[in-house]
Image: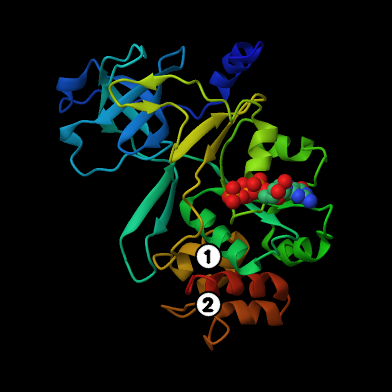
Amino acid sequence: MTGGYDEERLHQQFDRPRRRTRPRTKDRPRHADAEDAWVVGIDRGRYTLLVGDDDRRVTAMKSRPLGRKGVVVGDRVRVVGDTSGRPDTLARIVDVEERSTVLRRTADDDETHERVVVANADQLVVVTALADPPPRPRLVDRCLVAAYDAGMTPLVCLTKADLADPAPLAEQLAPLHVDVVVTERGGDLAMLRERLRGRTSVLVGHSGVGKSTLVNALVPDAELTTGHVNEVTGRGRHTSTAARVLALPFGGWIVDTPGIRSFGLAHVSADGLLAAFGDLKEVAVDCPRGCQHTASDPECALDAAVADGRVDAARVDSFRRLLASREGE
Ligand SMILES: Nc1nc2c(ncn2[C@@H]2O[C@H](COP(=O)(O)OP(=O)(O)OP(=O)(O)O)[C@@H](O)[C@H]2O)c(=O)[nH]1
Ligand SMILES: [Zn+2]
């Protein structure tokens, strides 16, 4: 740990998403001694937790009573056993708290089974390069749909502004009212830091857009390896981690999920997405029952609202583009 880091962490405890205080119901007597913990890493069946006021890093496994209930990064859990955080100890997760947000992907679009990727994060940062690799607007749309579906606030981060003008893409996103930040090589990250401060943010974007570059600039010791190998699990703490939560030195957290490249959105309904567009939702109360709100729904009230100037055509078009982006990959 580098100098000054502990001071930063003290400050972060106030920024960390609040633990839900749970009622001690009579059906939980067995684990009255369990402690609250936060899942900050998962690697092949082993969970890294932060436990206690001192944020001890504890390695844990799922306990049998959890059954097939999933535990994902960001989950608030209850843990028993050795939670000292000493090397070569293994605690047990006995319960998972209700999730405030749920970022899902479907394994394949034809597979209806949803998979939760991250729980309780509040912001989805969609990272897109302006060039090299060229932007994929449809992928951005799909990420936005996933964010709204998850109950997360989307933020679009346009990288590599030293290579291309951000204006065209920013203009295309404007009717969605989504926040956009622009970064470039050697540039100032103050705007991005401001958006990340005090929040738990998940970064997504396809290969080469500059996610690792951003994470390394934001979290100075992100690449540090401790060299310590847990003798129970046989694994190093920072090696080949599937997903992890990183503390931002200025307050807040970043969830690094190398696994997410795209989202299956087959489970997102038209009305589900509409819920993220408050102004359009208000207008759509006049839609016929079962309206899918597309341009080919003849009675869709969104068209009437555009015609008489209550809503902007570009806003409706953008909403419909997002609706359409649910199809396919
Ligand atoms: N010109 C320019 N290059 C950048 C910028 N940000 C990152 N790069 C370069 O883009 C390449 C890819 O960056 P990474 O940070 O590895 O991208 P990534 O999204 O983490 O990619 P994966 O690790 O494949 O998921 C590297 O060569 C970076 O140096 C930028 O703002 N401008
Ligand atoms: Zn409609």
* Residue 301 coordinates in the image, percent (x, y): 57, 79
Q: CA distance from mark 2 to mark 1?
A: 9 Å
Instruction: Identify the secondary structure beneath mark 2.
Output: loop
Please tell me how crowded label 2 is: few (under 14), some (14-19), or many (20+) other residues with Cα within 10 Å: many
Asked if one can make out residue 2 in the rendered structure from this viewpoint, the answer is yes
Instruction: Answer with mark 2 or mark 1, whichever residue precedes in sequence.
Output: 1
- Relative to 203, is 113 on the left or the right? left
Residue 247 occupies which quadrant of the picture?
top right
Residue appearing at x 29%, y 16% in the figure: 89
Viewer-proximal residue among 35 and 18 = 35
- From what the image shows, is residue 108 above or below residue 119? below
Residue 195 % position (x, y): 69, 39
x, y percent for residue 258: 50, 46
Residue closest to the eye, 217 or 232: 232
x and y, in percent, of residue 219 in the image: 64, 30
- Which residue position is annotated with label 2? 293
Front in this rendered view, residue 210 or 100: 210
Tag 1 secondary structure: helix
User: How many marks are shown on the rendered structure?
Assistant: 2
Say what amino acid the circle numbered 2 marks.
His
Q: Which residue is mark 1?
A: 274
Residue 79 vs residue 285: left or right? left
Task: State which quadrant residue 166 falls in.
Answer: bottom right
Q: Label 2 CB, ligand 2: below 8 Å?
A: yes
Mark 2 in CB contact with mark 1 (< 8 angstroms): yes
Quadrant location of the N terminus in the rendered image: top right
Q: Nearer the viewer, residue 18 or 206?
A: 206
Indicate how the structure is coloured in the image: rainbow
Q: Which residue type does callout 1 highlight? A: Leu
In the depicted structure, whether residue 106 falls above or below residue 3: below
